[in-house]
Image (cartoon, rainbow, N blue to C red):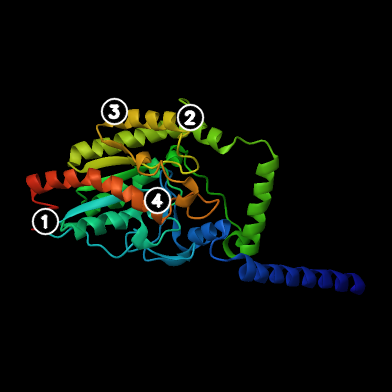
């Protein structure tokens, strides 16, 4: 009996030591600040917080700081990425809200290089009286963007909303399985689980990425139905509040010319047109560029600083006449005054 217990104890000690060594090696040699699954794990555990409402799911926590993809990410009291911002803009200042998912939040992009920051900085450099905030959160769909905007963004009294639309915004609400201790604390477990899942996906039956995206926009797809309703409600907000909401379509950056999802863009465009909100496709700002030069990393095709700079140019062309209208009608956002 003593011999059996001794052997069990020995095996347990060896397993614990091996697990600790594996964890140490993962953190020392695998975690280089650019390993996708580890960076997403850090984002989920250090910046995001759960919101159990069925139409929200998760959001950014207040006053969080983390280094993700080797760039610092901070949130202020409302969960917006960036510095603190007052509840109301100063007199004469037009406020622009940027609402969207990780492409708006600026995954893998320094704060100053996100299009949300670049647009405001460029307009201010032109002498415009503007400020703004970045309400982008990773893994949000349009319903989640709407829910948070109604809760938080509206309270900030924006004059203009740049609502960005990316092809995965048609996804249904994400699931939130119960997390184990390993899910929350072990880098080695996160890497192991991700790599096993990748192998299963690689060798098991699955739609390719093009088929996956296109399936989101079937007429009977549940996520697409909810997305259409969320876009319609954004349109209702624009009509009832007088806020100018413009929908900027951000292209999927794997392939650009020819663009494989023009049919999806056209479908979204038609829905947005019915809401009365302007729809602006930003594909022309990048379509002549080599797609891989616009990615945060290869193979992570989130828009990098170069892509955000191109999107900034397209946005400013649309936002400038909107600011001119605000200047004329409400004496806000004027230049050189």
Residue 2 at x, y percent in the picture = 90, 74
Q: Could you tell me which residue is drawn at 8 percent across and 44 percent down?
A: 329
Residue 216 at x, y percent in the picture = 49, 33
For residue 285, above or below residue 118: above
Does residue 319 appear to the left or right of 264 in the view shown? Answer: left
N-terminal of the pair, mark 1 or mark 4, is: 1
Mark 3 lies on residue:
274
Residue 92: which numbered mark, if any?
1
Residue 246: which numbered mark, if any?
none
Mark 4 lies on residue:
307
State whether residue 45 appears in this view.
yes
Query: Distance from label 3 to label 2 (Cα)?
Result: 19 Å
N-terminal of the pair, mark 3 or mark 4, is: 3
Query: Distance from label 3 to label 4 (Cα)?
Result: 29 Å
Which is more foreground, mark 3 or mark 2? Answer: 3
The residue closer to the viewer here, 94 or 251, is: 251
Residue 178 at x, y percent in the picture = 57, 52
Q: Secondary structure at mark 2?
A: loop
């Amino acid at each position: 009996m003593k011999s059996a217990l001794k052997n069990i104890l020995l095996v347990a000690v060896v397993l614990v030591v091996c697990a600790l060594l594996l964890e140490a090696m993962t953190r020392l040699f695998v975690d280089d600040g650019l390993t996708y699954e580890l960076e997403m794990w850090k984002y989920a555990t250090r910046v995001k917080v759960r919101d159990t409402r069925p139409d929200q799911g998760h959001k950014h926590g207040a006053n969080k700081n983390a280094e993700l993809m080797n760039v610092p990410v901070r949130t202020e009291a409302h969960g917006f990425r960036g510095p603190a911002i007052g509840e109301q803009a100063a007199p004469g200042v037009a406020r622009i809200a940027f609402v969207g998912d990780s492409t708006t939040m600026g995954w893998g992009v320094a704060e100053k290089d996100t299009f949300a920051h670049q647009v405001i900085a460029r307009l201010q450099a032109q002498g415009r009286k503007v400020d703004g905030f970045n309400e982008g959160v990773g893994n949000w769909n349009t319903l989640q963007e709407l829910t948070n905007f109604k809760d938080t963004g509206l309270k900030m009294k924006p004059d203009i909303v740049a609502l960005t639309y990316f092809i995965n915004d048609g996804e249904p609400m994400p699931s939130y399985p119960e997390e184990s201790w390993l899910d929350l604390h072990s880098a080695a477990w996160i890497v192991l689980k991700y790599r096993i899942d990748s192998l299963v996906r690689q060798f098991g039956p699955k739609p390719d990425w093009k088929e996956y995206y296109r399936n989101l926009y079937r007429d009977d797809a549940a996520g697409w139905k909810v997305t259409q309703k969320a876009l319609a409600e954004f349109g209702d907000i624009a009509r009832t509040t007088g806020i100018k909401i413009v929908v900027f379509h951000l292209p999927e950056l794997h392939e650009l010319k020819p663009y494989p999802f023009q049919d999806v863009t056209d479908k979204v465009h038609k829905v947005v047109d019915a809401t009365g909100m302007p729809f602006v496709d930003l594909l022309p700002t990048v379509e002549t560029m080599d797609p891989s030069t616009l990615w945060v990393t290869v193979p992570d095709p989130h828009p990098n600083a170069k892509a955000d700079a191109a999107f900034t140019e397209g946005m400013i062309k649309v936002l400038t006449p909107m600011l001119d209208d605000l200047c004329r009608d409400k004496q806000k956002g004027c230049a050189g005054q």
